[in-house]
Image (cartoon, helix red, strand yellow):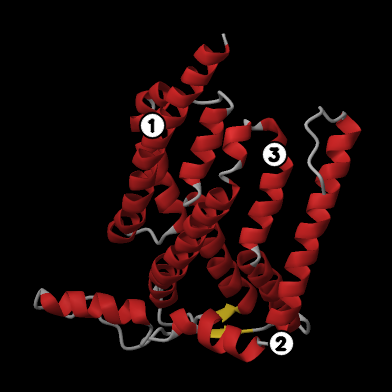
Amino acid sequence: MKESTKEMSFLGHLDELRRRLFKIALAVFIVAVVAFFFKNFIFDVIIFGPKDPNFVTYRFFCEVSRYFGTEGLCIDEIPFVVQSRTMSGQFNAHMWTSIIAGIIIAFPFILWQLWLFISPALYETEKKYAASFVFISSFLFFIGVLFGYYIITPLSINFLGAYRVSDQVLSNIDIDSYMSLLKTSVLVSGVIFELPIIIYFLTKFGVVTPAFLRTYRKHALVGVLILAAIITPPDIVSQIIVAIPILILYEISILISVVVYKNKQKKELTNE
């Protein structure tokens, strides 16, 4: 579609948004259909990978533990069984997993469509950074997804799956509960790792400033620790492992905000 330099009406914006959302939905649907036919690989290898004691994360922590002369972080089993208690439970899990796979894999295309929607509000010199925006945002998202899958999910499964209030209670975990934990860990991590991009646009549109981010750094630290406590098991080691990369992202976001804010001020002075 040819981009217009004229201001669009409110209905024009709605129509443009509708078209972008339709393309996004179509892309997610196509990828989801493809993922649907790779059921065995997706479930046996990816979904239930963190339930295997030989999963790469567990082996890594075990090696680290042995390096310090102990096997405290080594595990032999994850003592719970995943079950489906409803007639449509496994089919629903299959459908929703395919849709989530569609969203994750099609994420670069989703970003591209969103960029095309917001690009009219940007300067001409900024529009040329579309490819860089899509690449960096997608890279951060996929890193977040991997972090959620390889770090948060195994820590949560190992802690919660092995937790016992009594030997009288058997852990037969419903597939919906298992999938919910995995889905939340992966998608939330992906979104959190988009923090530098979010701060870029918030600074760009004047919502936040570097001074604001520095002033509320301590508040952000508390928020990060609370967030880490929510998305990880209630043990201090897991919370620290999750909190560290988020804090690093916050500091990177401040640096990005500084650059964007200075460039914005220069442009405003030039236009005066």
Q: Secondary structure at mark 2?
A: loop
Mark 3 or mark 1: which comes first in sequence? 3
Q: Secondary structure at mark 3?
A: helix
Please name the amino acid that badge 1 sits on: His
Q: Depth check: give the residue in front, 272 or 42.
A: 272
Please indicate whether residue 2 sits to the left or right of residue 100 in the image.
right
Q: Depth check: give the residue in front, 108 or 217.
A: 108
Q: Depth check: give the residue in front, 226 or 259.
A: 259
Q: Quadrant of residue 157?
A: bottom left
Q: Where is mark 1, residue-wise?
A: 219
Please name the amino acid that badge 2 sits on: Phe
Q: Where is mark 2, residue-wise?
A: 37
Task: Find the distance from the CA under tag 1 to the CA under tag 2.
Answer: 46 Å
Mark 1 or mark 2: which comes first in sequence? 2
Please name the amino acid that badge 3 sits on: Ile
Query: CB of mark 3 within 8 Å of CB of mark 1?
Result: no
Mark 3 or mark 2: which comes first in sequence? 2
- For image coordinates 57% across by 13% down, the residue present is 271
Task: Find the distance from the CA under tag 3 to the CA under tag 2.
Answer: 35 Å
Q: Quadrant of residue 69?
A: bottom left
- For image coordinates 10% across by 73% down, the residue present is 68
Q: Quadrant of the C terminus?
A: top right
Residue 11: percent from the left, percent from the top? 90, 34
Residue 180: percent from the left, percent from the top? 60, 67
- For image coordinates 50% across by 23% down, the residue present is 264
Q: Depth check: give the residue in front, 151 or 264.
A: 264
Q: Quadrant of residue 43?
A: bottom right
Q: Which mark is residue 118?
A: 3
Q: Which mark is residue 263?
A: none
